[in-house]
Image: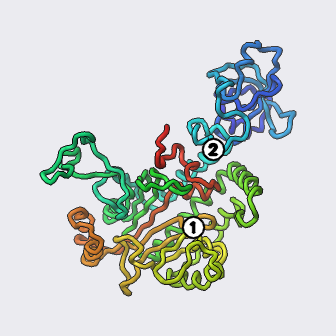
Amino acid sequence: MTTKTVAELLSQEVTLQDVSVKGWVRTFRANRFIALNDGSTLNNIQCVVDFENFEEALLKRVTTGAALHITGELVESQGKGQSVEIQVKELEVLGDSHPEDYPIQPKKHTFEFLRKNAHLRTRTNTFSAVMRLRSSLSFAIHKYFNENGFYYMHTPIITGSDAEGAGEMFRVTNLDPKNPPLTEEGEVDYKEDFFGKETNLTVSGQLEAETYAMSLGKVYTFGPTFRAENSNTSRHLAEFWMIEPEVAFMDLAGNMDLAEDFMKYVLSYVLEHNKEDLEFLDKRLKDEEKKLPQAERSPMDLIDKIKFVVDNNFKRVSYTEAIDILRNSKPNKKKKFKYIIEEWGADLQSEHERFLVEKHFKCPVILFDYPANIKAFYMRLNEDGKTVRAMDILFPGIGEMVGGSQREERLEVLKEKMKALDIPEEELWWYLDLRKYGTAVHSGFGLGFERLVMFATGMGNIRDVIPYPRTPQNAEF
């Protein structure tokens, strides 16, 4: 007999057939009703035991968290909450779970507690729903790019360059930390290191992806990136995943079209394929927000917020226009913003981005043409000499979701920008080569995957949308 998943059994219309299922016990009530879950769905299947037909010693082993193999007859359910249930004929305990010390008891747990038990937290409804959504979003991302003629590229995790110029990178070395080789000047001699130079974990695959776009046309990366920023906020991780497409012969307008189409596609995918999980997370969010003052509640429900992005055209607004709107807004004039906008050139904060999306335009917003001095060196300088062809996509409830630009394709301009920022040419000689041999307009963007998962699940802390979060002072599991 083929073992079926709980999801398959709950979708069955044919009853009065013998079935086999394996899973973990959520609850065992009245020595009779086992709620069994195998991770394939949010819902449990009820397995009804006639305790007179089973040894007492066996039934005592049916505890929360225990792994079981059950065979029996699938019948129409007599109870509420499910259409079918299993009348148990055979019950095998595959793995015991000691009830005295099993952490995930059938009660409400705090997210802080569950982070300490991250190896078991997907046995709760909330985290199983979040991780199924994470998986669906991953699949939708690959599906979108595959259907649109992109090639998937694996960019290096170990790198000798700092793509963002951020400087907050994790060093990769195999030198003896207590006794490293030194130069005559007393500095650590990285020529003696494994790679013969100073290397780090990457903060972005963009620069390498650009090189492949300039021969394959359309490529994307989707892999882990690392930032040694000592930030313990609910929106920062030291290890996170990035999606970075790069396209040859595409300008900023094409880049905005691509990003909008991509975001709508992946969110439409989960609306269609993860209804059950989204409805559960939507209800969870509503219940949580009932405890908050009205002013702190989300203006939209979770599913409405996702549909808001899918159903609305993204409004395209220049940075200069956005600054004028913000400067003249009520929150700015009445000093309700934490960061008051006073002049052109200010770096926008999340509160400003959310005001533009949620209050002013009431639709997702793409800001473009940012001041050059607040953006990265590789962004194409506009003719005004002050702004670059950058774009950020702003979403409700979260602010910036996507950041991208048309890349600087002119060799001399790029060299000048690197010189102004003290980026040595010899470090990025290969990147400059792209501008020597068949240079052309090209563009791309980056999307922090965990931020997308936060948006799609309504989770408020980025530590709760990645299996094992890496944050300052925390590398558990």
The residue type indicated by label 1 comes to Gly
Q: Residue at x 63, y 43 (%)?
A: 128
Q: Which residue is drawn at 71% across and 67% down?
A: 299
Q: Position of residue 24 (x, y in %)?
A: 66, 30
Q: Position of residue 405 (x, y in %)?
A: 42, 72
When the figure is inspected, residue 415 is found, relative to residue 127, above or below; the finding is below
Q: Is the residue marked by circle 1 packed among few (<14), some (14-19), or many (20+) residues within 10 Å?
A: many
The one of 338 and 238 positioned closer to us in this rendering = 338
User: What residue is disc 1 on?
Assistant: 399
User: What residue is disc 2 on?
Assistant: 127
Ranked by sequence position, the earlier of labels 2 and 1 is: 2
For the residues marked 2 and 1, what is the alpha-carbon distance in whole angstroms?
24 Å
Q: Where is residue 151 in the image (x, y as percent from the top left)?
A: 40, 57
The residue type indicated by label 2 comes to Phe
Report whether residue 216 is seen: no
Report whether residue 415 is seen: yes
